[in-house]
Image (cartoon, grey):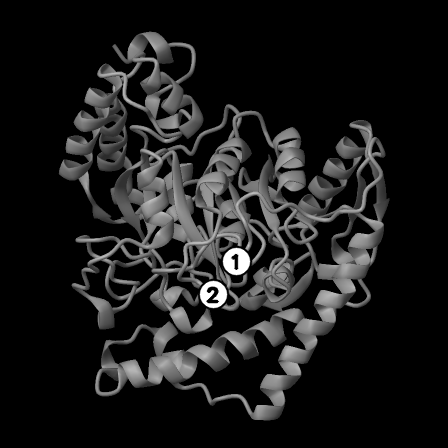
Amino acid sequence: MASTPTKDMGPIHYLDATTLAELIRTSQLSSREVVQAHLDRTAAVNPKINAVVTLMGEAALQAADAADKAVAKGAALGPLHGVPFSIKDALDTAGVLTQRGSKLFAGNIPDKDATAVARFKAAGGIPLMKTNLPEFSTWTETDNLVTGRTNNPWNLERTPGGSSGGESAAIAAGLSPIGIGSDVAISVRGPAAFTGIAALKATHGRVPYTGHYPAVTSRWWHVGAMARTVGDVALGYAILKGPDGFDGYAVHSRDGVADHGRVPGQPLRIGWVTDAAFGPVDPEITAAVAAAAAQLENLGCVVEEVRLPFLGNPLAALMTLVFGEIVPSVKALATGREADLHTVGAGILGMSDPSFTDFNGALAQAEALRSSFAGFFQKYDVLLCPVNPMTATPHGAQELVVNGVTVPWTHVMTATSPFNLTGLPALSVPYGFSSEGLPIGIQLVARWLDEDTILRLGAMLERRGGLGSRRPNL
């Protein structure tokens, strides 16, 4: 049965979630066939990339059979009906291991789903797997002492990034068509760019954070959809957004839109920047951003190269705020179990609490940056820039050479962290490949609550089908 509808589309495990939902809805594929295809792909590929930490195979097949019965009965079907999905292991899953990349949570089984997980399930999605992450989701390399290191499917010697690195690797390799990740400085957009998929960090508060660890840093974290196409990310966002009555930051209505102040019929105004704001940037990534700018101009946008003189050092401010909030909780949690911590957790334990002056200074930087971007978006509708300043980096690299300049590993977060500090919506779009055959992503940023604009532009810019005709050689 599977061969007919997918004959000209490629293997089931590389069909996007929207297509799979339509094929299941119209009985051209069964949900069981779809789930089994992804289980088969996982069995073949996961030993090489180690993206999956908990597989829910039997439960997923049972849910698929129930989904097929619902189709046969003509029941009302949700937009993800019968489609399997993956979940970063920082998000709670009822009755399923949620170990958060740390021995301190080994064997932890929540009794309730995170809001994001519950919403994907309510839309008909079938949870298939939990995916790997660094300890406490606090590193740009996906590695921990419980479930080990995840490899990039495009080059096993490179990282898929972090902290949603297991999620991005699983989706890029065809283990899952769509999933849920999270982002505090880079963590859905960076891994997406490193592995050639798409991811959205919506306006802070658009998607409830409820059921994600660590709760103490909820002012900066964003839960978001990840998939191989921007269209699937838009679908995931539509399902995830809206208040849940628990997250005090998730107060925006599901239909809330930006007050963009544009004159109807006027072209979109695009400002683009690379090295001038986020340098050094790999020349091939700069070339991709410039090419996207030219493409947008050809589509009728007004495009201008810009500088961001007000940017300052948002990464330092964000790190002061995030670690200033998480360090006390980790210290309390790890008392007497210090030996169980990964290098990442041990590093957190060794940090000093920021002074009152430093913490409030970082808050002042955040507020000033929000005001500066409010002014920027009076003149421009979208900022186009890199996601990561480089392509996927070697495992464990502490220093990197980018465009001839030696930089610390934290430089990978330079172009993403400003939008966590300000809560602006930012989309990672799969765009090209480097001369080494590694994916290159571009980033689109809009004013608060204007996700629709960057999702629309991202769908115009992305490689056809997200990965195009190229697939990881696994």
Give the percent coordinates (x, y) of residue 12. Answer: 34, 22
Q: Find residue 14 and report its horizontal and vertical position in percent.
A: 39, 26
- Residue 106 visible? The answer is yes
Residue 324, horizontal then vertical, whole percent: 49, 81
The single residue placed furthest to the top in the displayed view is 4
397 vs 16: above or below = below
Q: Nearer the viewer, residue 340 or 259?
A: 259
Q: Residue at x 31, y 85 (%)?
A: 332
Kind of residue at badge 1: Val
Circle 2 residues within 10 Å: few <14, some 14–19, many ≥20: some
Which quarter of the rendering shows the C terminus? top left
Residue 320's tag is none
Q: Is residue 189 above or below residue 42?
A: below
Closer to the camera, 76 or 338? 76
Q: Secondary structure at mark 2?
A: loop
Secondary structure of the residue carrying numbered label 1? loop
The residues tagged by marks 2 and 1 sit, at their Cα atoms, a distance apart of 7 Å
| Crowd band around label 1 with a 10 angstrom C-alpha radius: few (<14), some (14–19), many (20+) | some
Quadrant position of the N terminus in the picture: top left
Res 164 quadrant in image:
bottom left
Q: Which residue is mark 1?
A: 251
Please tell me which residue is depicted at 17% across the width and 31% down the height of the picture: 61
Answer yes or no: is residue 152 visible. Answer: no
In the image, taking residue 196 as reference, residue 461 lies left or right, namely right
Count all numbered tags in the image, as a single digit. 2
Say which residue appears at 50% left-offset and 74% top-offset.
Answer: 322
Which residue, given by chain and number where applicable, does mark 2 sit on? Answer: 248
Q: Is residue 93 left or right of residue 374?
A: left
163 to 264, vertically: above or below: below
User: Picture coordinates of residue 126 (x, y %)?
Assistant: 27, 36
Q: Amino acid at mark 2?
A: Gly
| Proximity of marks 2 and 1: CB atoms separated by less than 8 Å | yes
